[in-house]
Image (tube, rainbow, N blue to C red):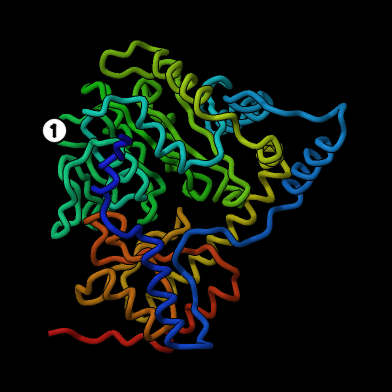
């Protein structure tokens, strides 16, 4: 008899983004012909830059000739791409060896799969609010208790709340944990950790033989030179941290699909000697993954060229101008807005203590604007919404204008 993995039943019902889509569809069905302004899901919208297109086209053309055709590549990623990634990190002042990079088809899959390296009994600490994949992958692995619907969290997980008081980046746990999930710049809050804040987590991890899973997928959006773009800017982080990153928001590869994970040789854990976790991830990738598309990898190599970096960063600047427009527009109607300066997300406090979904519905009904309820990212996200700066400029302007013209902020007693 086949027995299902009952941990799937523990998952809280209704993934965040499908629920948003359901409500949006219900509104459109009841209001035929009304256009919606989408400031919700963080999907890139601007065309790939010329240098990247040239790299993709060149690889496609090579696949059309026997003498330049290539099939399976190395599971760890093409050597030229890993060498280019090492050079990219060197430009950030960090030394990463090419064989410490593992190229993948995106950060989301790696963020979910990396937990398979660790014992099922591992105690998990998660930055709250956080991207749902960190939580859900560990629920499916059997590390959680039941979901407490009243409190909005899973039993057995340690939540590290990011609040206005700590500028939306938490302190390390006060109890012993084994795995710590951090995201900086944070999705959804847009908050970026300082060197001092990351140093505290590295010190904690080394003391307790914990491992930090550090998601840096939005690092290219950091404009403040005093903020770290990689956890490896912190001394000794190579002993305790795995970094996950992606070309998705960096270069518009949300559909092209390409990312990477860094597992340093020095990384250790309880009962694991240096090099063992690196070898385990290599074995895992060789067993369950045949490597990222060779076409996508050629595009990634083009992104890391001088022309590719310049052109990709110009598109990032475009999105960050969107963020500025949104921030000023929302503040002009009296909303409290955080983020949007070193990340493409703005974290907006709901007015007068409204619930996240309640304010989502108000924006939809009054302004035809779709945002993302903060409660969908964890219990600390309640009373906030996430607004995304990804979008064509004309659509951003229309959405902001609709909020300015139509949003009614009622005074509550």
Outermost residue, front side: 1
| Position of the C terminus by quadrant | bottom left
Where, by quadrant of the figure, is residue 25 drawn? bottom left
- Determine whether 351 is above or below 322 in the image: below
Residue 131 lies, in percent from the top left, at 36, 50
Density class for disc 1 (Cα within 10 Å; few <14, some 14-19, many ≥20) is: few
**Does the image show residue 197?**
no
- Whether 368 is drawn above or below 238: the answer is below
Residue 229, how many percent across, how many down?
Answer: 47, 39
Q: Above or below — where is 132 with respect to 177? A: below
Give left or right: position of 281 versus 191: right
Residue at figure coordinates x 56%, y 19% from the top left: 99
The location of residue 58, given as percent across then percent down, is: 81, 40
Judge by depth and name the residue closer to the eye, 130 or 326. 130
Question: Which residue ends up furthest to the top in the rendered image?
Answer: 273
Res 206 quadrant in image: top left
The count of marks equals 1
Residue named by callout 1: 175
**Displayed quadrant of residue 45:** bottom right
Q: Tell me which residue sits at (32%, 50%) in the image.
A: 130
- Spot occupied by residue 86 in the image (x, y as percentages of width and height): 59, 27
Please indicate whether residue 86 sits to the left or right of residue 336 in the image.
right
Asked whether 66 or 52 is in front, the reply is 66
Is residue 25 shown left or right of residue 193?
Answer: right
* Closer-to-camera residue (108/93): 108
Image quarter of the N terminus: top left
Dot 1 lies on which element? Answer: loop
Q: Can residue 306 be seen in this snapshot?
A: yes
Residue located at (25% from left, 21% from top): 209
Depicted 363 relative to depicted 68: above or below = below
């Amino acid at each position: 008899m086949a027995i299902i993995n009952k941990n799937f039943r523990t998952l809280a019902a209704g993934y965040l983004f499908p629920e948003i889509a359901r409500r949006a569809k219900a509104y459109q069905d009841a209001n035929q012909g009304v256009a919606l302004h989408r400031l919700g899901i963080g999907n890139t919208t601007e065309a790939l830059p010329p240098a990247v297109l040239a790299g993709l086209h060149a690889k496609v053309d090579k696949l059309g000739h026997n003498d330049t055709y290539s099939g399976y590549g190395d599971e760890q990623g093409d050597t030229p791409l890993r060498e280019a990634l090492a050079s990219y990190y060197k430009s950030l002042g960090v030394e990463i060896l090419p064989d410490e990079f593992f190229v993948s088809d995106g950060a989301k899959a790696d963020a979910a799969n990396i937990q398979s390296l660790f014992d099922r009994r591992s105690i998990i600490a998660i930055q709250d609010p956080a991207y749902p994949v960190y939580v859900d992958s560990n629920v499916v692995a059997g590390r959680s208790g039941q979901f407490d619907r009243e409190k909005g969290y899973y039993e057995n997980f340690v939540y590290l709340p990011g609040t206005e008081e700590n500028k939306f980046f938490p302190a390390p746990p006060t109890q012993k944990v084994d795995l710590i999930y951090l995201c900086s710049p944070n999705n959804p809050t847009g908050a970026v950790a300082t060197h001092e804040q990351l140093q505290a987590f590295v010190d904690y991890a080394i003391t307790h033989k914990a491992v930090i899973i550090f998601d840096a997928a939005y690092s290219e959006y950091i404009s403040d030179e005093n903020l770290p773009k990689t956890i490896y800017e912190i001394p000794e982080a190579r002993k305790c941290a795995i970094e996950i990153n992606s070309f998705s928001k960096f270069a518009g590869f949300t559909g092209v699909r390409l990312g990477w994970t860094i597992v340093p040789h020095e990384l250790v854990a309880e009962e694991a000697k240096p090099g063992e976790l690196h070898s385990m991830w290599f074995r895992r990738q060789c067993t369950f993954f045949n490597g990222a598309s060779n076409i996508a990898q050629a595009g990634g190599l083009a992104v890391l060229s001088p022309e590719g970096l310049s052109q990709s960063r110009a598109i990032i600047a475009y999105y960050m101008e969107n963020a500025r427009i949104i921030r000023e527009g929302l503040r002009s109607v009296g909303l409290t807005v955080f983020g949007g300066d070193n990340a493409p997300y703005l974290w907006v406090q709901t007015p007068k203590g409204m619930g996240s979904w309640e304010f989502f519905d108000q924006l939809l009904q009054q302004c035809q604007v779709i945002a993302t309820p903060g409660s969908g990212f964890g219990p600390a996200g309640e009373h906030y919404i996430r607004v995304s700066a990804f979008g064509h400029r004309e659509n951003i302007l229309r959405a902001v204008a609709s909020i300015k013209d139509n949003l009614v902020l009622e005074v509550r007693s």
